[in-house]
Amino acid sequence: MTYTDTLQYLYDRLPVFHHVGGAAYKPGLNNTIQLMDALDNPQTKYRCIHIAGTNGKGSVSNMLAAVLQTAGYKVGLYTSPHLVDFGERIRVNGQMINQQYVIDFVENNKDVFNTIEPSFFEATMAMAFNYFADSKVDVAIIEVGLGGRLDSTNIIQPDLSVITNISFDHVGFLGDTLEKIAFEKAGIIKPATPVVIGESVTETQPVFVQKAGKENAPLYFAEERFKVTFKEYSDAKMLVEINGKSQIKCGLCGNYQLKNISTALTAIEQLIALNYSILESDILNGFENITEITGLQGRWQTLRSNPTVVCDTGHNVGGIQFVVEQLKAQSYKKLRIVIGMVNDKDISAVLNLLPKDAVYYFTQANIIRALSCDELKLKAETFSLNGDVYKTVKQAVDKAVNDSDPNDLVFIGGSNFIVGDALPLF
């Protein structure tokens, strides 16, 4: 099989949550335990850091990876979903998984897949864990897929657990209150293993305190450790101040990254306490050059200028709140928004947050879960958001850019898949 054939086999043979939604969700660890046993438990052959949360998982994971790589560690990074290429999910020192490895792994484990019938996520996670072992990484940063307690990644025994924040997302699986969602995320807290909480609110903090106490796990709230304030943008980087004293330049822009930086710094503080060898220069260089080091895309990423085109992968209420705050901080002649969503999000809650003075270009990604652009337009009109529909992201982006004055701002977002379809256009 070719690389393309292999990926098609994975998509066709195994249910893919990010494509088809709830039908692909397989809660529980039975499949994962069987898969890992069949592979001789590769996840036990290196140190791990486990990261959960509603928003910010990818940014914090990549911040930690960049700093650790700069410090000289060989780092595996497992995140999801991918934006353009499947290989983005599985990286070693910023390099995507070797395509031949993907082909060989699937070919060699078809009998295992046929017997266990894992989900797409379970199978690719097994591939990642095996690849990291074969690559002899020093440490793997593992991002939770969905939730935490029943997520297939929850078989690892990490050095450190991180929960970035809690917001409403996947309520059909995780619960319809912040407390219930926090309970699921808190499931990654392990006995006597330090845990960092990036952001907590009145409803969620007691959940974390109770779970950490039950597991005798040292608990650290990032908001109490590091206050990160925005200073300025310079050379496509964001300069921030830490606790009113030192400064850090971060390669990820967007004010919503302030809390992620605080979370990552608290995690780094704990890694140092666990005898990871990390110098201050590693932290500074890692944050400043994060996108070059890890290959991360889609986080308030400027794609072109005159007009300015920016994309962001924020796709739920919490993520869109941050995006809207960031849009308010921009200066432009006219705001144009290319937007598409998937059909299992709280669409009305998201639309209610969006600015009413923008011109909208309603579109849809090429996946089953995509909300039709016609339906999105009808829903948006009830919130006084007006614009036209475009059947493909390319059509929407081309029209928005062609309509724009050089001083306009074009924002592209609403789902990971819209951003994924847009990135190759630039």
Image (cartoon, rainbow, N blue to C red):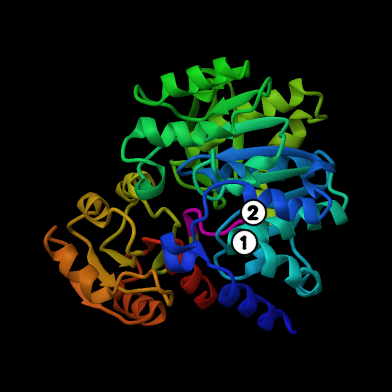
Q: Quadrant of residue 167?
A: top left
Image-quadrant location for residue 341: bottom left
Which is nearer the eye, 266 or 57?
A: 57
Can I make out residue 169 in this image?
A: yes
**Viewer-closest of 53 and 35:** 35
Callout 2 environment at 10 Å: few (<14), some (14 to 19), or many (20+)?
some
> Magenta region: which residues?
295-301
Q: Which residue is mark 1?
A: 118
The residue positioned 54% from the left and 75% from the top of the image is 424
Chief SS of the magenta region = loop
Q: Is residue 111 above or below residue 130?
A: below
The residue that disc 2 covers is 31
Residue at the front extreme, as displayed: 115
Q: Residue at horizontal 72%, vertical 55%?
A: 35
Task: Give the spatial CA distance, label 1 vs label 2.
Answer: 6 Å
Asked whether residue 304 is in view, the answer is no
Name the quadrant containing residue 126. bottom right
Question: Identity of the amino acid at label 1?
Answer: Pro
Residue type at the position of mark 2? Asn
Position of residue 147 measured from the top left corner of the image (x, y, whole percent): 49, 43
Query: In x, y percent, where is residue 45?
Result: 85, 43
Q: Are marks 1 and 2 in contact (CB under 8 Å)?
A: yes
Question: In the figure, is residue 152 to the left or right of 284?
Answer: left
Residue 42 higher or lower than 336, as above or below: above
Q: Residue at x 42, y 68 (%)?
A: 418
Q: Identify the residue at horizontal 14%, vertical 57% (top origin).
A: 383
Task: Work out whether residue 216 or residue 115 is closer to the camera in this orientation and state it.
Answer: 115
Magenta segment: does it hold 30? no
Residue 328 rendering spot, x and y as whole percentages: 30, 47
The count of marks equals: 2
Q: Which mark is residue 413?
A: none
Give the quadrant of the N terminus. bottom right
